[in-house]
Amino acid sequence: MASETRPFLKMNGLGNDFVVWDAREKPLRLTPEAIAALGDRETGIGFDQMITVERSSLGVDAFMRIHNRDGSEVSACGNATRCIGRLLMEEAGKELVTIETGAGLLHAFDADGPRSVTVDMGVPRLAWNEIPLAEEFADTRAIELQIGPIDDPILHTPAVVNMGNPHAIFWVDDVEAYELERVGPLLEHHPIFPEYANISLAHVFDTDQIRVKVWERGVGLTLACGTAACAVGVAAARDGRTSRKTTIHLPGGPIGIEWRESDNHVLMTGLTEVEFEGEVDLDTLAWRKTATGDAPLAAGAAS
Ligand SMILES: N[C@@H](CCC[C@H](N)C(=O)O)C(=O)O
């Protein structure tokens, strides 16, 4: 039987990168092993997430299936929602699209500025069993959790927020002062998180400015994480550390977050980029680039 070659797009939201398949006409399911092999940055295409765009059973613009690089399927990815929102808006010539995800229906719309998209990420879930946590905490603004020596912990008492996926946020004075690649895996797999968790270090340096570094569940260190930016913005405002409108500065660039007072929805705004087009032989997983992506943005357009 002839091998099947499938085209893909390589995209990123502030450096958090994805392979995007269009499976609306022809279904595509890869094994976790194949996803991990394609996601490997040394030997495969290299990505944080794999996104499969499918037909929505609810009749909205599309369904977006999300896999982490380790092959696990998850319900939410903020940066990918902006990227898929852009593709669907460009394709249909619309200014607003609705995307079905494992976490519910999300609306994406054009923001000011080239390639900038806003997504309404919905209402954050804040109760301990919605995160979920393995034990009850009445107040999820600071849960009892620490790593390191009992009397001198390295990190402790994170805030927790669910944005369609679980997030823990540790407030620190300097996000660079910690070996996130060492403590991240310990915290991601801590028994308090039955579904594991995405881990952020966050430093509030003004009433509306926060620097953040993220260790992503199923991935590792990332240049940006949209749902982490939402979770940090919510946790900071909830505590009175910031206003409800913040800029989250990630290694890959800034994301604007607004936790709207009128309906508690979180709006996330940031850049999207098409890196290149390519194709993969699904039998051998050999791949090649077939076309270039977006031209570089004019200086200043990204800020
Ligand atoms: N990159 C993402 C989040 C991807 C999923 C996450 N690793 C998880 O397992 O929940 C984003 O931009 O939100």
Image (tube, rainbow, N blue to C red):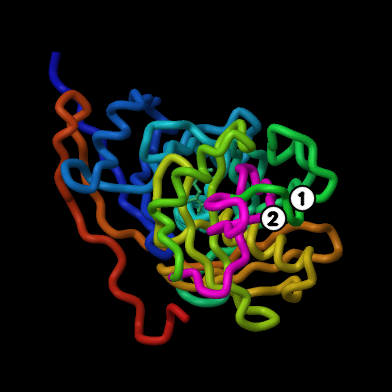
31 in relation to 172, above or below: above
46 in relation to 248, above or below: above
The secondary element bearing badge 2 is classed as strand
- What residue is shown at x 55% (from left), y 37% (from top)? 196
Nearer to us in this view, 184 or 91:
184
Mark 2 and mark 1 residues within 8 Å of each other at the beta carbon: yes
Residue 101's x, y, as percent?
59, 39
Position of residue 276 in the picture relative to residue 155 (left or right): left
Q: Residue furthest bottom?
A: 300
Q: Is mark 2 within 8 Å of ligand 1?
A: no
**Circle 1: residue type:** Thr
Residue 274's x, y, as percent?
34, 59
The residue wearing badge 2 is 159
Residue 73's x, y, as percent?
48, 32
**Circle 2: residue type:** Ala
What is the CA distance from the residue labelled 2 to the residue labelled 1?
6 Å
Position of residue 294 in the picture relative to residue 205 (left or right): left
Residue stretch rendered in magenta on the structure:
147-176
* Mark 1: few/some/many CA within 10 Å (<14, 14-19, 20+): many
Toward which corner of the image does residue 69 lie, by quadrant?
top left
- What residue is shown at x 27% (from left), y 61% (from top)? 293
The secondary element bearing badge 1 is classed as loop
The residue wearing badge 1 is 140
- What residue is shown at x 78% (from left), y 66% (from top)? 239
Pick whichever of labels 2 and 1 is earlier in the sequence.
1
Question: Is residue 165 rendered magenta in the image?
Answer: yes
